[in-house]
Image (spheres, grey):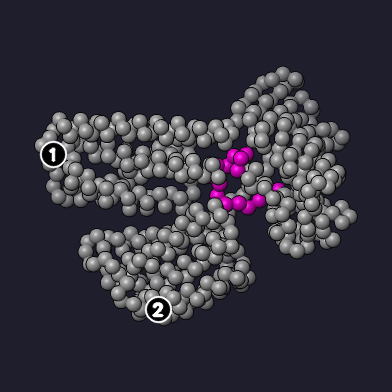
Amino acid sequence: MYDRLKKLLSPLFIFCLILLIANDFYMKATFHNAFTGKLSDFCGLFIFPIFWSTIFPRHKLWIFIFTGILFVFWKSELASGLIELLNILFNIQRTVDLSDLIALPMLFVGWFYIKNDSIVLIADSLIARLSTLIVSGITIFAFCATSQQRYIQSFDQPQYVLLKSATVPDLNLYDEFEFYPKDSLLVVKVNHWYINRPIRNDDYNKNHSLEDLDKNVVARLADSTTVIPYGKITTLTINTAEGEDFLRFNGGRLDGKFSRKVNDKLIIEGFYKMGVEDSTWTFTSGDSDNVVVQTFVNGERTSVKQFDHGKLVAKTHINTRAYTIRNTYVQISIMILIIIFMIRFLIKNYRNTFPQELKLKLVWKWLICLISPIFVWLSYIGTRILLMDFNEDIFVILASFLFISVVVCPLMFVVVFWIKLRKEMDILLYCLIFGLLCSIWTSCGTLIALYN
């Protein structure tokens, strides 16, 4: 088995695998440009046929040919029916973009690369054999993670953009829009917007998704519409299924007072500042007895007050992005203090028992090293849940398990065979320390993303 899988340890294969995962989980969401869009195709067309050729070496040529045919099929409209069928069981997303076919030459690169017998730098050993299995698991995970689900940004308050358009687009083609033509103008109600997975589903992230919304809608509708320049004030009234909306636009974005009436009763009143909620918003029930007042600062809700017959009955404070960042710093500081305390406890155990050590058979030492990543991962998950920062995305959960397994297993070998265990309690302490370190790593990544 190792002779077949050893090519997975080649430098270029591992580099492309790391680049594929980094692009799908970080670079696409951060930069979101044409380069990151094509990068996964180039890396995927290199590692996909090489991986399956190591599993089925006798069918190498057919694997490369079939990979090319499958890629062309997947990127065309012909695959739409198959994807709809698969979406009954799986959430698969695919963008039809024939320009992605420029990545096809990577198949020739992979074919000539796999023909080279001197591409493996690691000699046959137990570590090499374990590495091939780990890389194989990560590769399969990378193939699955490329089709992650799209995230939907919904809007609590009505969101409109104003465009110039001589025609009305086909509503059946756009599930996220509603169209209201006004002479040569087109009012587009945006019910939701597809975005990359947010680090926090808060108002700050929503405001970020609203940047250049009119331009993004124009790009989504293709060449049938154009943007209205900033500075042109337009006031409109439209009738929707929810009521009669009074809109004020500056260019193509809502700017100024907004109100909605149902049967001549005012039920929503508020203000926009270039498409973002501003100041105070008031929501009134049909009988006018129950009123909800939301306060916005820089587009972020700071408080929600509920009144019944003019009397305040409930008040809720909403954490802004700045508060979340400050709270994350506090959490990291507390975890660092806990780690310092546990390290001092380990040092105390070491001094009290030196030169004695915990007597374990070799098989138990190996078992501790191989199984401990599971307990580290569980402590990591428990910490994230405790911090109310647990991501339920199955790909993120699997990625965290793979990362912790790859990192913690060698560290436990160092602990067990070099530093050496002194008491049974040390095993638990090391697992907790590694789990907290992984959690600190995640929180630091969250901080970086929160600042963006």
Q: Which residue, given by chain and number where applicable, does mark 1 sit on? A: 357
What is the magenta range? 191-205
Residue 338 vs residue 447: left or right? Answer: left
Residue at image position (62%, 39%) is 203
Q: Is residue 43 visible?
A: yes
Q: Is residue 80 magenta?
A: no
- Quadrant for residue 292, please give it: top right
User: In whole angstroms, how far apart are the C-alphas of marks 1 and 2?
Assistant: 53 Å
Is disc 1 surrounded by few (<14), some (14 to 19) or many (20+) residues within 10 Å? few
Residue 82 vs residue 49: left or right? Answer: right
- Residue type (three-letter) at the residue carrying disc 1: Glu
Q: Position of residue 19 (x, y in %)?
A: 45, 60
Image quarter in which the C terminus is found: top right
Mark 1 or 2, nearer chain start: 2
Residue at image position (36%, 34%) is 336
Q: Position of residue 2 (x, y in %)?
A: 27, 68
Q: Position of residue 144 (x, y in %)?
A: 47, 60
- Residue type (three-letter) at the residue carrying disc 2: Phe
- Looking at the image, residue 105 lies above or below residue 438: below
| Numbered label attached to residue 73 | none
Q: Position of residue 379 (x, y in %)?
A: 35, 40
Which element type, helix, strand or loop, lies under badge 2?
helix
Is disc 2 surrounded by few (<14), some (14 to 19) or many (20+) residues within 10 Å? few
- Quadrant for residue 421, please give it: top left
| Numbered label attached to residue 112 | 2
Q: Nearer the viewer, mark 1 or mark 2?
A: 2
Residue 53 vs residue 38: left or right? Answer: left
Residue at image position (67%, 46%) is 210
Which element type, helix, strand or loop, lies under badge 1?
loop
Image quarter in which the N terminus is found: bottom left
- Looking at the image, residue 151 lies above or below residue 120: above
- Looking at the image, residue 296 lies above or below residue 169: above
